[in-house]
Amino acid sequence: YNSVLIDDNSNGCNTIQEVEEACTYVETYENNVENELIIYPNPVTDNLSIRINNRLKIRSINIYNYLGKSVLQQEYSTEQIDISHLIKGVYIVEFVLEKSIIRLKVIKK
């Protein structure tokens, strides 16, 4: 037998069917979103620009280094992120949306 225990979840996530529907919705949402959120230039020197479809609502932006350590956290307020203080390397830019998270790789030169 394969058994599943679902315990202490939020409303709407208490049965296998509810969890599967929620995960399927998020996956579809993310696939559509990736084409509507673009960061440039990449590689970047000082300021990373964001181009986003107006229907998407970014709550916050987090940047992680190659070790997974958070190096920048901010609320979304502008279409530019100043990363001039970061050292050269590869980073993951995480956009926290209303219903999903998008992670994109950026190279700081």
Image (spheres, rainbow, N blue to C red):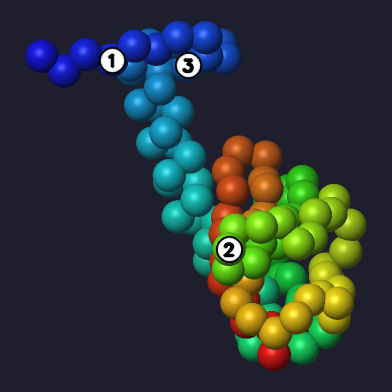
Front position among marks 2 and 3: 2
The three-letter code of the residue at mark 1 reads Val
Q: Quadrant of residue 78?
A: bottom right
Report which quarter residue 46 is drawn in: bottom right
Determine whether the residue tagged by mark 3 lies in a helix, strand or loop.
loop
Q: Is residue 104 left or right of residue 5?
A: right
Q: Secondary structure at mark 2?
A: loop
Label 3: few (<14), some (14–19) or many (≥20) C-alpha neighbours in 10 Å: some
Q: Which mark is drawn over residue 4?
A: 1
On residue 13, which mark appears?
3
Q: Residues within 10 Å of mark 1 (few under 14, many from 20)?
A: few
Q: Earlier in the sequence, mark 1 or mark 2?
A: 1
Location of residue 92 (image quadrant)? bottom right
- Please report the residue visible at 75 percent of the width from the left and 81 percent of the height from the top: 87
| Distance from Cα at disc 1 to Cα at disc 2 | 33 Å
> In which quadrant is the C terminus drawn?
bottom right
The mark nearer the N terminus, 2 or 3, is 3
Per the model, the C-alpha gap separating discs 1 and 3 is 13 Å
Q: Quadrant of the N terminus?
A: top left
- Visible residue check, residue 41: no
Residue picked out by circle 2: 67
Mark 2 and mark 3 in contact? Answer it, CB < 8 Å.
no
